[in-house]
Image (cartoon, rainbow, N blue to C red):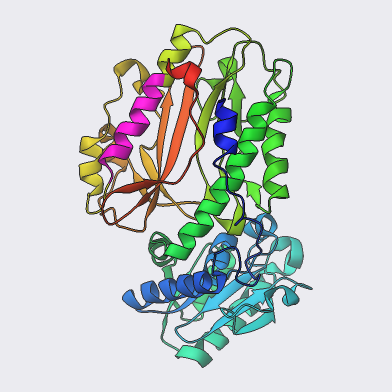
């Protein structure tokens, strides 16, 4: 049995092709998912005495309500689509001509047209537009929860935030309550995560089958994109696929470089997939036709060891500091090119918490506790500084009451582990 046969026989795609607003089917209760997520946001608001939350990040709007619309566009044109959340009411301010998209969502009490307060929309009148935007939304907040409430706000035009402050709003950053809400997944959310992973694994299987000398990195990377869209995923958030000498150092985006014989090909999926959930695992392949070199196999086996050691120490109740202390020791010759994180949270995108290497903890790390319901990606990049090639591997796991459950299931390369 080949590795592709192994994968094909274990990929159940029955639960993937659902819109967030679709009726409950395929074993996922999307209504329960949406109501759980909204309740999580409200719980975290209450803990911080935040009376109103203005959400502008399209991923966080989707998390809070389930609604989706032009996520890339609206992430760079703010505020053009935004959400107001209070303890008792949600109002979605939808982009012009798109108000119908929120129909059928029990998490949205009212839809209003957004007031796009950006320079491209308002031109020289941007300052007046921002002041009008602030007056309008503050009037609604006052009507719903009173005049002196704390308002949580996400990234906005500086002028829009300043206009709110000038009107007397007490503003706080909305990142903390939303990130803390997102980090604990319900059982129904995990079904969404698994559906996204299975669809992405099918796409990576097609990509692996398309590998051959002479194809460009971009052509190969497009195979995954096509499959993600066909299976009702959203998009690839990055373009991390590279080959040969471009695998070292990491973070070189796919290009028109032609893939040569006997090279390594490394990728990180970073797929915003089915139901908006992130499918995030990394694999490294060998092109052939010759067998992998001993150096290629060594890089792969070292990366494989790092990932599996660090999965083995994860568990509920472990502090971030304890994780850093127990994590795999990176050999000196690979240290300079280490991946910037040891592990990280994942949900609808990469999220809280970041788990740092022991050597980086003093400067970059922070403490906290790993909790049941968190989904964590465990990372490895192994490549010598100045080396010819490198290996990227990563797995996605669920923290349970008793340990971890492996969520990503794409097989590793046996010919690189021998």
Who's the residue at 44% across and 67% down the image? 174
The secondary structure that dominates the magenta segment is: helix
Q: Which residues are magenta?
A: 301-314
Against 391, residue 369 (above or below) is below
In the rendered view, tell whether residue 75 sits above or below residue 314. Answer: below
Q: Which of the 4 quarters of the picture holds residue 266?
A: top right
Q: Is residue 229 above or below residue 222?
A: below
Residue 336 image point, x, y percent? 37, 22
Return the x and y of residue 145 as percentages of the image width and height: 46, 89
Say left or right for 404 vs 79: left
Left or right position of 10 against 261: left
- 128 to 16, vertically: above or below: below
Q: At 22% across and 49% down in the image, what residue appears?
A: 318
Which x, y percent locates residue 352? 39, 53
**How many marks overall?**
0
Residue 334 percent coordinates (x, y):
37, 19
Viewer-proximal residue among 407 and 66: 407
Quick check: is 312 in the magenta stretch?
yes
């Amino acid at each position: 049995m080949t590795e592709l046969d192994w994968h094909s026989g274990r990929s159940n795609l029955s639960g993937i092709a659902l819109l967030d607003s679709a009726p409950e089917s395929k074993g996922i209760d999307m209504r329960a998912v949406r109501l759980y997520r909204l309740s999580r946001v409200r719980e975290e608001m209450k803990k911080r005495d935040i009376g109103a939350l203005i959400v502008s990040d399209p991923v966080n709007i989707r998390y809070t309500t389930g609604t989706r619309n032009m996520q890339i566009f609206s992430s760079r044109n703010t505020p053009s689509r935004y959400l107001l959340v209070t303890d008792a009411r949600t109002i979605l301010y939808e982009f012009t001509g798109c108000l119908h998209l929120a129909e059928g969502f029990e998490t949205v009490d009212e839809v209003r047209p957004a007031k796009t307060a950006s320079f491209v929309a308002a031109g020289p009148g941007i300052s007046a537009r921002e002041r009008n935007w602030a007056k309008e939304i503050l009037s609604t907040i006052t009507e719903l929860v009173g005049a002196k409430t704390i308002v949580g706000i996400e990234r906005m035009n500086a002028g829009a935030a300043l206009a709110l402050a000038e009107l007397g709003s007490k503003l706080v950053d909305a990142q903390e309550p939303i990130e803390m809400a997102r980090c604990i997944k319900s059982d129904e959310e995990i079904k969404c995560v698994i559906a996204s992973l299975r669809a992405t694994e099918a796409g990576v299987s097609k990509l692996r089958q398309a590998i051959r000398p002479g194809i460009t990195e971009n052509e190969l990377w497009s195979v995954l994109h096509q499959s993600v869209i066909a299976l009702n995923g959203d998009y690839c958030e990055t373009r991390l696929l590279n080959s040969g000498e471009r695998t070292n150092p990491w973070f070189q985006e796919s290009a028109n470089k032609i893939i040569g014989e006997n090279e390594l090909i490394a990728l990180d999926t970073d797929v915003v997939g089915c139901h908006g959930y992130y499918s995030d695992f990394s694999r490294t392949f060998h092109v052939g036709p010759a067998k992998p070199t001993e150096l290629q196999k060594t890089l792969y086996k070292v990366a494989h060891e790092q990932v599996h050691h660090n999965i083995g120490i994860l568990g509920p109740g472990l502090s971030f500091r304890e994780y850093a202390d127990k994590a795999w020791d990176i050999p000196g010759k690979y240290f300079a090119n280490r991946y910037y994180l040891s592990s990280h949270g994942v949900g609808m995108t990469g999220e809280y918490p970041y788990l740092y290497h022991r050597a980086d903890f003093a400067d970059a790390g922070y403490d906290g506790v790993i909790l049941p319901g968190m989904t964590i990606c465990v990372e490895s990049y192994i490549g010598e500084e100045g080396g010819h090639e490198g290996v990227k591997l990563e797995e996605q796991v669920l923290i349970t009451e008793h340990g971890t459950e492996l969520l990503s299931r794409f097989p590793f390369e046996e010919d690189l582990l021998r």
